Image (cartoon, rainbow, N blue to C red):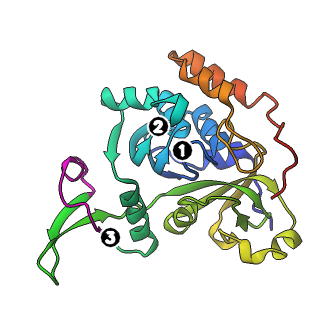
Amino acid sequence: MTKVKALNEVAASVEDGATLALGGNVLHRAPMAFVRELARQEKRKLRVVKTAGAHDIDLLCAVGAVDQVDAGFVSYETVYGLPPHYRKAVQTGVVKANEHACYTVISALRAAKTNVPFMPVSGLKYGDLIEKNDYFVVVEDPFTGEPVTLVRAIVPDVAVIHVQECDKNGNAIIHGPKFEDVLMSRAANRVIITTEQVVSDFTIKQQKERIDIPGFLVEAVVKVPKGAAPAACYPAYDVDDRALREFLQLKEADQISHFIHRYDQQDHREVRGERKW
């Protein structure tokens, strides 16, 4: 039985108030088509989890979909600068930023993966980061008597991960850096895959040793070519520079809404050469 479903149907299954883990890293392989569909459906009070976010978190904050963010880093990097909508939402108190180091987000997800309530972390013993984030606590190590910091587990209700290829059963292969996507798939209660292409079962079986996310973990598969755009997806396409620069200039709600609706109506299928996974 196929797990391939329509984008709007699968996005509708994400409830308001859900804890949502987004795959990819900064401007690389983020599930942007899914993020835009969440925006169109006017989801609210989402808690977004990601080690290093960018356009995905910024866009969701721009449309008022976010209540909290757990991230070690949120920025567009290099020439694009800081995310204006996320920054404004945090500064005005609309969004609560649970600031982490990237590795403490990873530790919180590892705790969820192993079904324990917290994970000890090394090296984080002092500073404002511990004081400002309720998900950290310093306790005495029962073996040595030394202080040790614990980070509370973060269990995503849903993890949405964009991949280059997947079969109809949800067996997914990631090409290039995997970031925290495999970990997210093990930590979350539900896993949704968006994919550049749905390949045959035979194709996946021929490279079964490369499967990163097995189908039994996956609830739904959505075929979305250029599904990471305007972020990049190695090796098929780079960032959409013009679209990112346009978005970063938008301030009014109607402008942002128009951008979201218009972007998916455009033809983004051009790639640099052939897709060779």
- Secondary structure, mark 1, is loop
Amino acid type for the residue under numbered disc 3: Pro
- Report the Cα–Cα distance between label 1 and label 3: 28 Å
Residue shown at 71%/60% (left/top)?
Answer: 175
- Label 1 CA crowd tier, 10 Å (few <14, some 14–19, many 20+): many
Quadrant of the drawing holding the C terminus: bottom right
> Are the residues flagged by discs 1 and 2 in contact, CB closer than 8 Å?
yes
Residue range corresponding to the magenta coloring: 119-135
**Residue beneath label 3, please?**
117
Residue 259 in the image, given as x and y percentages of width and height = 65, 23
Between 123 and 168, which is closer to the camera in this rendering? 123
Q: CA distance from mark 2 to mark 3?
A: 29 Å
Residue at 17%, 77% in the rendered image: 141
Amino acid type, label 2: Ser
Which of the image's four quarters has the N terminus?
Answer: bottom right
Q: Is residue 214 above or below residue 66?
A: below
Q: Is residue 249 magenta?
A: no
Question: Which of marks 3 and 1 precedes in the sequence?
Answer: 1
**Could you say whether the residue bearing mark 2 is in a helix, strand or loop?**
loop
Residue that label 1 marks: 26
**Does the magenta segment cover residue 121?**
yes
The residue carrying mark 2 is: 75
Q: Residue at x 11, y 78 (%)?
A: 145
Residue 231 picture quarter: top right
Residue 58 point in image, percent of width and height: 50, 33
The percent coordinates of residue 46 (x first, y second) are 45, 43
Q: In the image, which is nearer the foreground, mark 1 or mark 3?
A: 1
